[in-house]
Image (cartoon, rainbow, N blue to C red):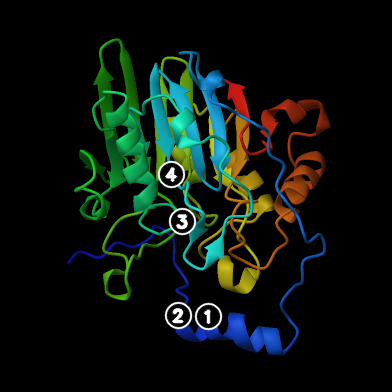
Amino acid sequence: MRKFSNLDPFERRGPLDILKWRITDTLAGRRRKDRDAPFVTPRVENDGRALACDEPSLTWIGHSTFVLRLGGQVIVTDPVWSKRVGPVARSTAPGVAIADLPPIDVITISHAHYDHLDRPSIEALVRHNLAHGRAKPTLMVPTGVGRYVEDLAPVVERGWWESMTLQIPGRDVTFTLVPQQHWSMRVPWDRDTALWGGWVMRGPEGAAYHAGDTAYFSHFAEIGTRVGPIDWAMLPIGAYDPVWFMKPQHMGPEEAGRAFLELGAKQLVCMHHGTFKLTDEPLGEPPARIEAWWNAQGPGPAQRARLWVMPIGETRRL
């Protein structure tokens, strides 16, 4: 079976590294303790009415899940509505219940990890469409990911830099898969046999970029050049501590800020924080650090409106 690899050199972590992080570092007192626990990510009530009209908008459901209205289509990214991802419980309820969503046209998946490809959530979205008398949503996935979901809904696979324009009468959106620095696995024997990537979704109102899961790497400027301009860049800012373990696969807030500048995007939309405590940093730390970076090294306070640190459940017009 084909194996995929990253564009930049990748420092692979294995079972001994996990043992060091989870056990050895704990016994040695090197693991951080939450300074702000208990912390609950800010959440606003959203009954879905803001998504009922055709105006372009972006709604954060939590983690890497957004509902995007673009080009008249309703797009869901990396859908996770489940209460748990493996042993990790959700810290804050999803921003909008599936029952309160409009029917979904497209679901994008960035890679096969369980906190980004959650089959129960996809199944629930399919049932939601069928209950409204609508066809199943189209699943846009990287090469090789289709085998995990092809029994649920129609699948379109793409490799890096490959595009597809999904045509719904009068509503066209072009989807392009772009490289990311990460890896893939569902079970121990299928590691890196399915590709990973971010999706750039371009409609008449502009382009939204969902980075999925990624470390900082040297190709963000190339993404901005090859598929730009990008209006709304959804970039991960959490799951980075301990840095020695996470750096090859996840970005911290400052690296996300650097990636944003290299992309040349108009808005930085923060994600992959405040929902599941996957790593050692306090849940409330990533937003505070991206704010500090923005003011000290980024565009600055005068352009604060370009930084979107959204509460879960918020809908913003695009």
User: Mark 3: which amino acid?
Assistant: Asp
Residue visible at 67% across and 68% down? 280
The residue to which callout 3 is attached is: 115
Disc 4 marks which residue? 79
* Distance in Å between CA atoms under marks 2 and 3: 19 Å
Query: SS class of the residue under badge 4?
Result: loop
- Residue type at numbered disc 2: Gly
Q: Which residue is mark 2?
A: 14
Foreground disc of the pair 4, 1: 4
**Going by the picture, which residue comes out furthest to the top?**
170
Mark 2–mark 1 contact, CB under 8 Å?
Answer: yes
Q: Is residue 170 above or below residue 110?
A: above
Distance from the alpha carbon under mark 2 to that under mark 1: 7 Å
Amino acid bearing label 4: Pro
Residue 176 visible at all: no
Between 98 and 158, the one nearer to me in the picture = 98
| Residue with the mark numbered 1 | 18
- Residue 67, compared with residue 93, is above or below; it is above
* N-term-proximal mark, 2 vs 3: 2
Q: CA distance from mark 1 to mark 3?
A: 18 Å
Nearer-the-camera pick, 172 or 131: 131
Mark 1 touching mark 3, by CB under 8 A? no
- Mark found first going from the N terminus, 4 or 2: 2
